[in-house]
Image (spheres, coloured by chain):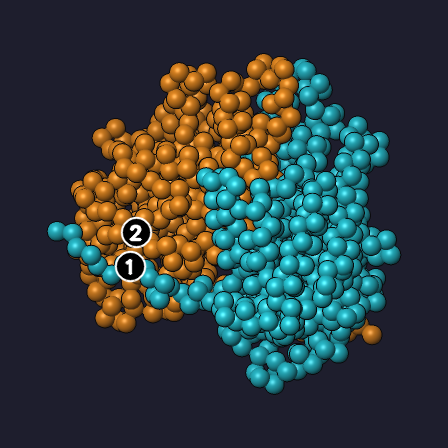
Chain colours: A orange, B cyan
Amino acid sequence: MSFIKTPAVTLESINPKVRKCEYAVRGEIINHAHRLQRELETEPGSHPFDEIVYCNLGNPQALGQQPITFFREVLALCEHPALLDRDDNLALFSSDAIARACEILDLLPGRETGAYSHSQGAKGLREAIAAGIASRDGFPSNADDIFLTDGASPAVQTMIQLLIRTEKDGILCPIPQYPLYSASVTLHGGSLVPYYLNESTGWGLEILHLKNQLEGASSQGVAVRALVVINPGNPTGQVLSEENQKEIVEFCRKDGLVLLADEVYQENVYAGDKKFNSFKRIARSMGYERDELSLVSFHSVSKGYYGEGGKRGGYMELCGFSTDVKDQIYKVASVNLCSNILGQILSSLIMNPPKVGDESYESFAAEKERILSSLARRAKALEDAFNKLEGVTCNKVEGAMYLFPRLQLPNRAIKAAKIANAAPDAFYTHRLLDATGIVVVPGSGFGQVPGTWHIRCTILPEEDKIPALVSRLRAFHSSFMEEFRD
Amino acid sequence: MSFIKTPAVTLESINPKVRKCEYAVRGEIINHAHRLQRELETEPGSHPFDEIVYCNLGNPQALGQQPITFFREVLALCEHPALLDRDDNLALFSSDAIARACEILDLLPGRETGAYSHSQGAKGLREAIAAGIASRDGFPSNADDIFLTDGASPAVQTMIQLLIRTEKDGILCPIPQYPLYSASVTLHGGSLVPYYLNESTGWGLEILHLKNQLEGASSQGVAVRALVVINPGNPTGQVLSEENQKEIVEFCRKDGLVLLADEVYQENVYAGDKKFNSFKRIARSMGYERDELSLVSFHSVSKGYYGEGGKRGGYMELCGFSTDVKDQIYKVASVNLCSNILGQILSSLIMNPPKVGDESYESFAAEKERILSSLARRAKALEDAFNKLEGVTCNKVEGAMYLFPRLQLPNRAIKAAKIANAAPDAFYTHRLLDATGIVVVPGSGFGQVPGTWHIRCTILPEEDKIPALVSRLRAFHSSFMEEFRD
């Protein structure tokens, strides 16, 4: 009775857009790292290292970063409100965490984290986020413009899905870019129109080049609908100057492009002479009101000093979108009912952390400072280390969580890569992993000027592990360069 | 300098698939309910009722259902592990919740709910879920086949996205159906191939009719790729018989269709003579091994006796998919990094609740029984109430959370609806809402045999509010029928 049939689904019979989509941050190199990790577990000593150091993904808590106590107190209380009823709860939780949890529960349907909220997110939490945005920018923000999402990634996908009709719709994306953008454009069948960040000017964004790329796309029949800007940059780590941001706003406004502003690293600025400015603040300070620029700002609980990626919390603020278009976004959001409530709560907390005078304030501020100053030191240490390697140059990490050093590889290494059927940077990252257990992502996963090679390495390994990591990296790199010296 | 331009995005310039998509459960009737609620708040007494009763959405905790204590204890401990280190924690939490939280933290990267997990979900949690499935079905389950997701809805969308290439790919969907399916098929540009459930046989699913619909689609050049079955049914509440499930398995196997089994109501069975059987158990008990049927089972933490929709937890188990196809699903999942960790944890808990002998077992079992028996009584009370209304017939609610009564409306009501530019059932639900504050969804949002009219009403209002709700419904219905009597 049973017989082998053609399976209902084969690689050849799935949606080709799915097949074509790429996402390098969790690509082949990571699968290889997982294999090595299993081998280390089943056969200790089978490799020249004791552990895999995952520098591929901005995942701070996986590498030992501690969560912010106040945030976790509030979340635990919201999750199990019975704790609020205990007489001894002040021995367990700070008074402001208790007060905040009570306020938040009042904003939730049924006073429960287990109920679906409004599909844009619970109204009261959106109001709290709007207040936080207004206080950050000095310009008003409206809860109706905010959509809470399961992290920034689904928010970006929602906007790309909204904007792309056919392959004749294009999205201007930076190169190098975080591959969420290329993956989303591919999945929704649009055209990625690249613009190159200028490595020699610290990954500068040049408006003239943007215009050229836009015109080039137009001449090929591609209508560019939006410009993606990642600030602070991923994987490139630059923080845009106010002047540059103004030019970008002007460019989008004049050409009727939606400005998709990935601002998830807004709290990760390490360069003393740089400051994060939201694009909304820039646009409003130029006198542009909501009808004059269509702008989406994406934010997330995953980065900053909180690093709560596993919570999948985030939001997008839409400025300059008509009600009927926002209704369409609401409709699409409602198909998934709502984003997770704990993530919604945490989004409201990061935009409204403890204030001077609150019981938690001092310990909160100390935890925050400890994390951010350590990240800055780690960024500097790794940047210096990369710059000391033969043939490697690394721009300053002004912000975000990544280094993106450029590798000048010997011709013999490039030939060896070709024989191994790999891009030269992928060849390098595999050799690095096999020799040291360090996982970084080849630059080809982010895009780069053809003929240049890079790697992306996070700044997230624990601070006391950095010196050993640098030694291993240095030893590997020397021997790699020796092996392939022309 | 500033001038009014065409906005970058207009309703006309967005993706037409987004525009075309519909999702009635949070559609126009709900917006109207929200307006009335605001009016009640700003002007009490402005309507002939004191509160809006939301019977539109399966959202138990929004209507007063209490969460299961054990689950919340574990989640709170995982969220704030500092509580585990306190000497007095046994005064605050049950010993098995403490033990379970410790076990779970060991399964998470960095022992933190704030770290991203593997994009399929943390391996250890998937193993726990696989063990729960195996124990439910009596057949093995493999963690590699399980994908944890932010609720069942994104899982369904992922599968629809995978299967649909062009509008020539079809998905067989029940009518009436939960509109997630029609919305997903529309968003991904495929064809919904309907099959009608037979109301006169208790929403029976007839294989001959399925075959006819499949052949009809084929003859129009539509390749049907999958069959959606919702069991227990939403909005229709039937629980499939084992015999019927066997026929469905045979049909999918022979025609090479993927069986997309929406099994989110598997714990919501009220009919004493009915029992939930997973399609996997049915297929395995027929002797079909994994290569012989491609089957996806969707489950969620949102329904059952737990009703934790706001947690956005769920999973899909893929059986009979090749590794290379699962790799593609993994890749798409990785673009969003992972589903939220609290939802992942809760998914592992619902599949492995306390067992006899655990400290929490007795109270857990009592809480569960209280909720499920109350749901059964509410279903019966509302079913009886609908059946007593003039011109209304309502099939037995064997499972799930909804009634889907049929309305025989007077011709004059149908004409009045036409004048109001509304479908007759939408006209009825608007009148019901305006008169009573009760929100139900018109059947047209789920699909129905042309010329028949239904409403979907959840069984979720609190039990002590049911009698008053029934009185208001009865009074409204009588006056409606009087007003429009032919």
Residue A469, horizontal then vertical, whole percent: 44, 32
Quarter of the figure with the N terminus of chain A: bottom right
Image height of A377 relative to B15, above or below: above
Residue B135, horizontal then vertical, whole percent: 80, 48
Residues packed near mark 2 inside 10 Å, few (<14), some (14 to 19) or many (20 plus): some
Assign a secondary structure to mark 1: loop
Q: Which residue is mark 1?
A: B8
Q: Amino acid at mark 2?
A: Gly
Q: Say if residue B368 shows up in the picture.
A: yes
Residue contact between numbered discs 1 and 2, judged by CB atoms under 8 Å? yes
Residue B404, horizontal then vertical, whole percent: 69, 61
Image quadrant assignment for residue B74: top right
Q: Which residue is mark 2?
A: A320
Q: Say if residue A304 shows up in the picture.
A: no
Assign a secondary structure to mark 2: loop
Image position of B180 (left or right of A126): right
Image height of A319 relative to B204, above or below: above
Q: CA distance from mark 1 to mark 2?
A: 9 Å
Image height of B290 relative to B272, above or below: below
| Mark 2 belongs to chain | A
